[in-house]
Amino acid sequence: MASKDRPLSRIELLQGTLDLIILQTLRWGPRHGYGISQLIRAGSKDVLQVDTGSLYPALHRLERQKFIAAEWQTSENKQRVRVYSLTDRGRKQLAAERSKWEKISFVIAGLMKALPESEP
């Protein structure tokens, strides 16, 4: 994430948001990649759909940062899948990121109420 004295770039904001969503999803228990994407989709009522081109790089990044751990398992339909779970370090990161997200959401909501409507 960006340092305190510089704003987040668009890429950092998007990656940070996806990371937060993945960590939150894994808070509910270990999942393989497809399960994570389906839970995000269902939990957002089909508003958020994370494609594999975004999901797996994020999972690998979170694993490198030791926020999640991965292990190979066999699925119900006998396929070998990589299952991801939240680490203790990941739980701490999730708490920090949730706090930041709540502050950002509060500020944006305030701006939306405070900004004058543009005239047609």
Image: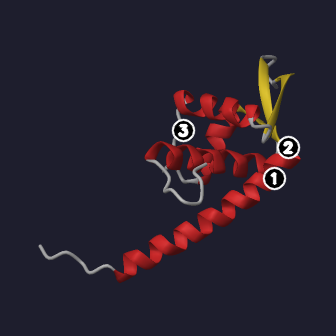
Residue at image position (81%, 55%) is 92
* Amino acid type, residue under disc 2 in the picture: Thr
Residue at the spot of label 1: 91
**How busy is the neighbourhood of tag 1: few (under 14 within 10 Å), some, or many (20 plus)?**
some
Q: Residues within 10 Å of mark 2 (few under 14, many from 20)?
A: some
**Dot 1 and dot 2 residues touching (CB under 8 Å):** yes
Res 77 label:
none
N-terminal-most mark, 1 or 3: 3
In the rendered structure, which amino acid carries the disc numbered 3?
A: Val
Question: Quick one: 50 or 4, which is closer to the camera?
Answer: 4
Q: Position of residue 98 (x, y in %)?
A: 68, 61
Q: Which mark is residue 50?
A: 3
- Estimate the spatial distance between the alpha carbons at disc 1 and disc 2, rounded to whole Å: 6 Å
Which structural element holds mark 3?
loop
**Which is nearer the eye, 118 or 72?**
118
* Image quadrant where residue 60 sits: top right
Residue 48 visible in this rendered orientation of the protein? no
Helix, strand or loop at disc 2? Answer: loop
Residue 66 shows in this picture: yes
